Structures are given as structure tokens and as C-alpha cells.
Amino acid sequence: MIPGRVAISSRALERTVAAIAAGALRVPPSTVRVTLADEAGLLGVSVTAPLRTTALRSTAPADGIVTRVQAARRGIRAELTELAGREIGRVNVTISRADIREEKRVR
């Protein structure tokens, strides 16, 4: 073990969470807002972002919104724990809007 400590700034953690959430929700990181809080020694995470989806009348199979957001929350928690080495408390994800993408036709 090497003496000393490693500190990660709040801004660095926010950007890390934004990148992780963007990947999980398939949206650009610039569209993701992150708030971090101390929750009795645990890192509390709140994410607000759009959710990329296909048109409502799409023929493409898709998981429900709640299922996708729950999967994103689990992914954010797991990846942040691994990358930051911090104990994570609550992970709240708020979907701000739908980012609707048209299906690509295969020729």
C-alpha cells in the first residue's frame, strides 16, 4: 500500500456519471444533467436526461420505458462503483423528454 490518498473532485464525478448515463440511455452526454449529494456517507446520484426511443408506431420490438430506465439505473450504479470506487446510495433517474428516432429501413 502506498501512503497518501486519492481525491476525485465533484466536477470530475459529475462528468463521469453524465458519460455513464449517456451511454446507458443512448443520448449525448451534453443532454444529461447530474446532481451529486452526500447521503449519510454514501454518494447519492440524480440524473435528468432524455430517453432515446423509436417512434410510437414503430414495428421494432422495444422494452418498456420503465424496464429500460431501471436497467440504466443498475448500470450507472455498477459502473460508477467500479470506476470511482465509492459506495453508491440512491440513484434517481428522471426522464426529461423522449428523443424519438425513426427506424432505419433495411434494403
Image: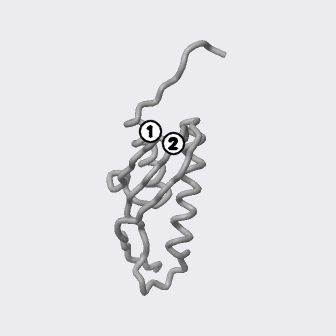
Taking the spot 55% from the left edge, 64% from the top edge, the residue there is: 70
Q: Amino acid at mark 1?
A: Leu
Of residue 56 and residue 10, the one placed in the foreground of this image is 10
Q: Position of residue 96 (x, y in %)?
A: 35, 65
Is 64 situated left or right of 99 in this image?
Answer: right
Q: Which quarter of the figure has residue 4?
A: top right
Camera-near label (1 vs 2) is 2
Q: Position of residue 1 (x, y in %)?
A: 67, 16
Disc 1 to disc 2, C-alpha distance: 10 Å
Q: Secondary structure at mark 1?
A: helix
Of residue 90 and residue 59, the one placed in the foreground of this image is 90
Taking the spot 46% from the left edge, 80% from the top edge, the residue there is: 107
Q: Which residue is mark 2?
A: 43
Q: Earlier in the sequence, mark 1 or mark 2?
A: 1
Examine the rendered structure and indicate whether residue 22 appears above or below residue 52: above
Q: Amino acid at mark 2?
A: Leu
Q: Are marks 1 and 2 in contact (CB under 8 Å)?
A: yes
What is the crowding at mark 2: few (fewer than 14 residues within 10 Å), some, or many (at least 20)?
Answer: some
Q: Position of residue 51 (x, y in %)?
A: 41, 66
For this orientation, the residue located farthest to the right is: 1
Q: Position of residue 97 (x, y in %)?
A: 35, 69
Q: Secondary structure at mark 2?
A: strand
Q: Which residue is mark 1?
A: 13
